[in-house]
Amino acid sequence: MSEHEKVFIPKESIDKLVSGLKSIRITTREKATRKEVGKLLDLLQQDLSQKNIPLKEQILEKMKESKGVDPNLNANLYILYRNLDSGQITEEQALELFQMYVKIEPYNKTIL
């Protein structure tokens, strides 16, 4: 296998792996083991980071998360998605806006 070759693993299996590693990290008393598990978790998180997911999917996922919690964010993301999908803005512009919306989200929530 080449260094950058991708492998398909079901998300459920990855979630179980991450959960198991977190459990080991919490329950073990050995510092070396905790450190090694931390490295493995970081490696997994790095490979599973948002960089590997297309921007449109990231926006849709964040829209779903914010649907009942933050209607303003949901509306902004919907408009962003539609503008990106229709080609009215570039992917770079959309990414910049998406990152800005996500950064200000904690400070901009509507209290219901």
Image (cartoon, rainbow, N blue to C red):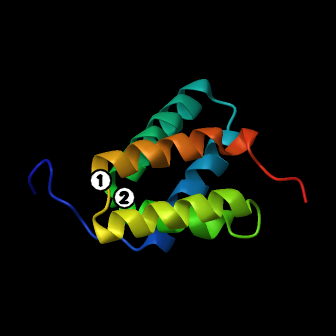
Q: In terms of image quadrants, where is residue 9?
A: bottom left
Which of the numbered marks, if any, corresponds to residue 102? none
Secondary structure of residue under mark 1: helix
N-term-proximal mark, 2 vs 1 = 2
Three-letter residue code for mark 1: Glu
Frontmost of labels 2 and 1 is 1
Secondary structure of residue under mark 2: helix
Quarter of the picture holding the C terminus: bottom right
Three-letter residue code for mark 2: Leu
Residue located beneath label 1 in the image? 91
Point 34% across, 70% down: residue? 85
* Residue 36 x/y as whole percent: 48, 33
Quarter of the picture holding the N terminus: bottom left
* Residue 43 x/y as whole percent: 39, 41
Left or right, residue 84 beside residue 18:
left
Point 29% across, 53% down: residue? 91
Point 35% across, 63% down: residue? 84
Residue at the extreme front: 88
Can you see residue 16?
no
* Residue 95 x/y as whole percent: 38, 48
Point 15% across, 57% down: residue? 5
Residue located beneath label 2 in the image? 55
